[in-house]
Image (cartoon, helix red, strand yellow):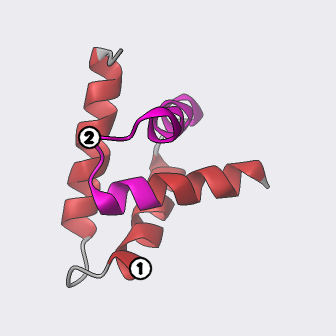
Amino acid sequence: MLTAELKNLIKMINHIADNIAIADNEALTAPKVAAHVCNFWAHQMKEKIIDYAICDGELLNAVAKTAVLQLRSKSEK
């Protein structure tokens, strides 16, 4: 179930991905989005968006989903 908080996180990360987009190049954009989230989002926010991406992720745009999965990889290390 999508809570209001999760809906807001999805909206925010999609917006960040759209604004950072570099000539529609997902490979260049996703790490920048992941870095932004890593630097500016609270740990709990990151956990919620990672959990959402793993379980569903349907509402994330392609760049945002790639970025979130990169965050997941970093958090597992």
To which residue does mark 2 refer? 59
* Mark closest to the chain's N terminus, 2 or 1: 1
In the image, residue 73 sits, relative to residue 59, either above or below, namely below
Left or right? Give the position of 37 relative to 44: left
Q: Element under label 1?
A: helix
Give the total of numbered labels.
2
Any part of residue 36 in sight: no
Q: Secondary structure at mark 2?
A: loop
Q: Is residue 64 magenta?
A: yes
| Magenta region, residue range | 43-66
Query: Is the residue 48 above or below the residue 54 in the image?
Result: above
Dominant secondary structure of the magenta stretch? helix
Quadrant housing residue 56: top left
Picture residue at 33% right of the left edge, 63% below the top: 63
Q: Residue visible at 47% across and 70% down?
A: 31
Numbered mark located on residue 77 in the image? none
Q: Disc 1 marks which amino acid?
A: Ala
Tag 1: Cα neighbours inside 10 Å, few (<14), some, or many (≥20)? few
Image side of residue 66 versus residue 25, left or right: right
Q: Identify the residue at horizontal 28%, vertical 60% (top origin).
A: 17
| Separation of marks 2 and 1 at Cα, in angstroms | 20 Å
Answer whether residue 58 is magenta in the image: yes
Q: Position of residue 5 (x, y in %)?
A: 33, 21
Instruction: Give the residue displayed 29% in from the left and 82% down from the top.
Output: 25
Task: Determine whether, in the image, residue 51 is placed left or right of residue 6.
Answer: right
In the rendered image, which quarter contains the C terminus?
A: bottom right
Tag shown at residue 27: 1
Instruction: Give percent across and percent down for residue 45.
Output: 48, 32
Q: Residues within 10 Å of mark 2 (few under 14, many from 20)?
A: some
Residue 43: x %, y % from top left = 58, 35
